[in-house]
Image (spheres, helix red, strand yellow):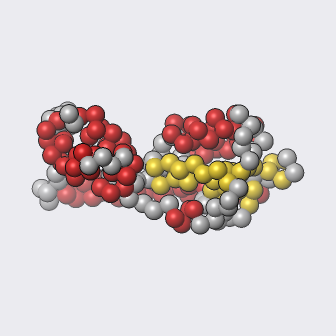
Amino acid sequence: MKARYIRVSTGAQNTARQEERQTKDEKVFIDIVSGSTPFKNREQGKELIKAIEGNEINYISVTSIDRLGRNLYDILTTLEFFKEKSVILKVDNLGIESLIKGKENQAFKLIISVMANIAEMERETILERQRQGIALAKAKGIYKGREKGSTESIEDFLFKYKEVVKNLKKGNSIRDTAKICNVSIGTVQKVKNNIK
């Protein structure tokens, strides 16, 4: 059976672009998680691994290699697992598959190593820009980050996410609330755990 793996970093991001190549015979696995989270630690990543180990999935499509991750080691580990299980990975934007007639596609291996390196560099660039922005804000005296070692009270935390509280109290699901409020599922879960 075929599968399509989709990943977006936040609930505010749209999965439509990744879904447009989906075919009827594909089982879809969607994760809303940072690309820095190892594939094997993601909710749907775990489900996909379970399906592969149960011989339910033998072909996986992704729109681009950075959907699997933004860490070279993690991507290569995931690809090695797919290869061991004889699962073919197709990367849509490159138009290539990992295995040809059951044998490793050497061109795929080379291109993926380069693309995975680029994905990792992009993540480092994002983090560096973030660090520079914080340093600039601190220099201007406008940085609003929490002091190191301090903890936020539950009341302050819930006040900061009052829209999330409101949506949860309306009966919206965690996933829907994350999308509506443009926050992570983890944040919504934390809010849910702290409201009475």
Q: Residue at x 57, y 48 (%)?
A: 29
Residue sitting nearer the eye, 152 or 71? 152
Seen as rendered, the residue at the extreme front is 171
Residue sitting nearer the eye, 51 or 64? 51
**Is 17 on the left-hand or right-hand side of 140?**
right
Q: Residue at x 15, y 46 (%)?
A: 159
Residue 24 shows in this picture: yes
**Quarter of the picture holding the C terminus:** top left
Q: Position of residue 108 (x, y in %)?
A: 74, 56
Residue sitting nearer the eye, 13 or 110? 13
Res 94 quadrant in image: bottom right
> As displayed, is residue 70 above or below residue 94?
above
**Is 104 on the left-hand or right-hand side of 130?**
right
Q: Residue at x 71, y 64 (%)?
A: 95
Residue sitting nearer the eye, 81 or 180? 180
Q: Position of residue 146 (x, y in %)?
A: 18, 43
Q: Position of residue 60 (x, y in %)?
A: 69, 51
Q: Residue at x 56, y 54 (%)?
A: 6
**Is 35 on the left-hand or right-hand side of 97?**
left
Res 137 quadrant in image: bottom left
Tag count in the figure? 0
Residue 128 shows in this picture: no
Q: Position of residue 53 (x, y in %)?
A: 70, 34
